[in-house]
Image (tube, rainbow, N blue to C red):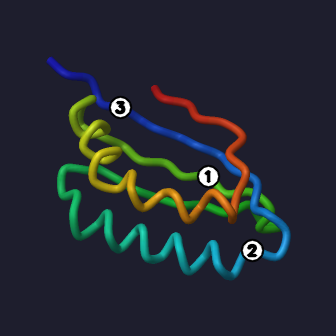
Amino acid sequence: MSEPIVYVDTSEVRAGRLPELKAAIRKLAEFVEANEPQLVSYGVYLTEDESHMTVVHVHTDSESLDRHMEVAGPRFEPFADLVTLTSIHIY
């Protein structure tokens, strides 16, 4: 039996880039929702001061995470100028 996979990444929001980040995240979340029905959950959270962002997605199995990286991965590049990735945890 496959185990669920929980993916959590945290990033520091680059100074002055928050408006662009919010727009980019909105587009990415809409894309993921429309194209990845296998995902159990996909959420993006900002700290109260909006200086850090955490992305959490829950997958039914490792194949779902692989599919997410394949389908949505090409859409991650614009985020390179908006955030500094500080951690990735996969449970």
**For residue 65, what is the image quadrant?**
top left
Q: Amino acid at mark 1?
A: Thr
Q: Which residue is mark 2?
A: 17
Element marked by disc 1: strand
Number of other residues with Cα within 10 Å of mark 3, as a class: few under 14, some 14 to 19, many 20 or more = some
**For residue 20, what is the image quadrant?**
bottom right
**For residue 52, what is the image quadrant?**
bottom right
Element marked by disc 3: strand
Q: Amino acid at mark 3?
A: Ile
Q: Which residue is mark 3?
A: 5
x then y, percent, for residue 15: 85, 69
Residue shown at the point (42%, 61%) measured from the top left:
75
Check the picture and name the quadrant holding the N terminus.
top left
Q: Which residue is mark 1?
A: 54
Lateral position of residue 1 relative to residue 83, left or right? left
Q: Nearer the viewer, residue 82 or 33?
A: 82
Which comes before the other along the chain, label 2 or label 3?
A: 3
Q: Nearer the viewer, residue 82 or 53?
A: 82
Number of other residues with Cα within 10 Å of mark 1, as a class: few under 14, some 14 to 19, many 20 or more = some
x then y, percent, for residue 67: 24, 43
Q: Give the CA distance from mark 2 to mark 3.
A: 30 Å
x then y, percent, for residue 10: 65, 46
Q: Give the CA distance from mark 1 to mark 3.
A: 16 Å
x then y, percent, for residue 57: 41, 47
Asked if residue 16 is positioned above or below residue 69 in the image, the reply reads below
Lateral position of residue 82 relative to residue 33, left or right? right
Asked if residue 15 is positioned above or below residue 36 in the image, the reply reads below
